Image (cartoon, helix red, strand yellow):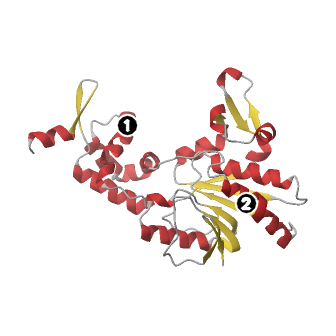
Amino acid sequence: MNEASKGRDVERRGGSCRLGLREKDFKRFAAFIHDECGIKMPPTKRTMLEARLQKRLRVLGLADYAEYCEFVFSPEGMETELHHLLDVVTTNTTDFFREPKHFETLANVLLPQWSAATGNRREYRVWSAGCSTGEEPYTLAMVLSDYAESSEGFDFKVLATDISTRVLQHAAKAVYTVDKVSKVPQRLKSRYLLRSKDRTKQLVRMVPEVRRRVIFRRLNFMGDFKLKKPRDAIFCRNVMIYFERPTQEKLLGKLCDNLIQGGHLFIGHSESLTGLDLPLEQVAPTVYRRV
């Protein structure tokens, strides 16, 4: 190895030297991450992966990335460390009322249509697929609760899933900073958010009746999954951007299998279904109906 290569593969932290993530180890991680959860990990992500794994090295007391790689792929590591590895490689960018037109379409168009067709005789089932820290499913629960106020007999349940146990634990607590809920309309804030008694903490929590409406579960999109009951609506937004096109099509096929005929799929505004063979027709920007 020449001196330039040595320089790239050695990082200094607190005055001590630690070997960086070797190319062969990065390739092994990248292949495993792609196979396990579908996320593409090109060479440009090597520095990012190094940075995100630093905490795991400190927690485990390991000397370098090579030692961590050896541990992860051991039988013990596969059992105890795998979920931590997947936690650090998944990106969890989300917000309340993100891409608000989707919620307007749901509340003002799709829900009234559904109520007229069913007479509210059964529960409306919605799935937040890739729910991250809970902002999306709780937004859905607030919107649906608000709709229920004006639609007699309307009932619903929100399923929220993610591959990361870390974000699911955060989401289940339903506690957020005041600035995090800034996009929630004031009338919904006053109805569905509780301020912390200690005002110095600047925290809010979803009210119990909203928390009870959301069920959190861990789910890996790359596995075989079939929900007990098909959904009336699936929100899978800004998730597919991390997948290659064949992986996207396979995932979307699975989502369609879990979407009731006439149900709706919501995807992110930066995502597209163009060229994919799916039983879907577009009804609004990035909103599709299962045919």
Q: Residue at x 42, y 60 (%)?
A: 36
Q: Residue at x 49, y 61 (%)?
A: 240
| Image vertical order of residue 215 relative to residue 189, above or below | below
Given residues 115 and 76, the one toward you in this image is 115
Q: Going by the image, does 23 lie left or right of 5? A: right
Given residues 274 and 162, the one toward you in this image is 274
Quarter location, residue 60:
top left
Q: Going by the image, does 273 lie left or right of 149? A: left
Given residues 236 and 207, the one toward you in this image is 236
Q: Residue at x 88, y 69 (%)?
A: 119
Relative image position of residue 285 (x, y in whole percent): 62, 64
Relative image position of residue 266 (x, y in whole percent): 62, 63
Determine whether the residue tagged by mark 1 lies in a helix, strand or loop.
helix
Given residues 187 and 161, the one toward you in this image is 187
Q: Residue at x 86, y 66 (%)?
A: 120
Q: Are marks 2 and 1 in contact (CB under 8 Å)?
A: no
Q: Going by the image, does 28 lie left or right of 243? A: left
Q: Which residue is mark 1?
A: 60
Quarter location, residue 230:
bottom right
| Residue at the outermost left position | 2
Q: Amino acid at mark 2?
A: Leu
Relative image position of residue 57 (x, y in whole percent): 35, 37
Q: Give the position of the C terminus as an image quadrant.
A: bottom right
Task: Give the distance between the C-alpha atoms of the residues marked 2 and 1, in whole angstroms.
Answer: 46 Å
Q: Amino acid at mark 1?
A: Leu
Q: Which residue is mark 2?
A: 106
Q: Mark 1: give few (<14), some (14-19) or many (20+) Cα within 10 Å.
A: few
- The answer to whether any part of residue 213 appears in the image is no
Q: Give the position of the N terminus as an image quadrant.
A: top left
Numbered badge on residue 133: none
